[in-house]
Image: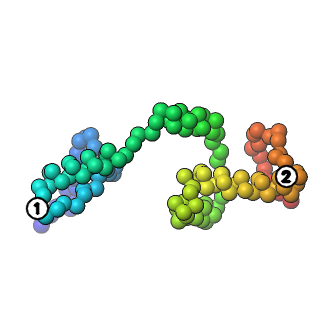
Amino acid sequence: MSNKNTPRQSNLKSIFNSGEHPVRAQVVPPVPPVEANEPLETAVSEKQGQRSQGAKKPSKAKKEAAKKENSNRERMSIYGSSDELNRFRAAFARTAYEEGYESLSDFIFKAASKEAARLEKKYNNGERFEGVSRIGAGRPVRR
């Protein structure tokens, strides 16, 4: 018979004191298949060595180009209903590989670029709209 007044012991304190995060998973590379007569240690080390030889590190020039491309990027927040934002996320997640989107930001940016091009064609003879770097906060534009 247990005593209902005895507090339950939690193991969370011991987990947090161990230095490991209780949720963060460790990434473990997949183990390649092993031949029937091959020792496990030899098979794994040889096959992982073959993989690492094929993988190349990005060149210094590519790293510099990526850094330069990202240096002029600016953050912009968008707001919408949960349903619409979930729709955007789902469309990105289901088509990113086939359509070549690198990230959700890339997906949204390309969609906004297409809409901007349509508006420029309709209202500005196909020329880019210029002269606005920031839009102030305030009431939404209404008709």
Please name the amino acid that badge 1 sits on. Answer: Asn
Give the mark, 2 or 1, whose residue is nearer the N terminus: 1
Above/below status of 95 relative to 9: below
Could you say where residue 141 lies in the image, as x and y percent from the top left? 81, 53
| Residue 26 visible in the displayed image | no
Alpha carbon distance from label 2 to label 1 = 69 Å
Left or right? Give the position of 65 relative to 6. Answer: right
The image quadrant that residue 96 belongs to is bottom right
As drawn, the label of residue 37 is: 1
Residue shown at 79% from the left, 57% from the top: 118
- Of 61 and 129, which appears nearest the observer? 61
Q: Nearer the viewer, residue 48 or 110?
A: 48
Answer with left or right where residue 61 lies relative to residue 135.
left
Q: Quadrant of the N terminus?
A: bottom left
**What amino acid is at disc 2?**
Gly
Does residue 139 show up?
yes
Quarter of image, res 53: top left
- Which residue appears at 28% of the width and 43% of the height? 20
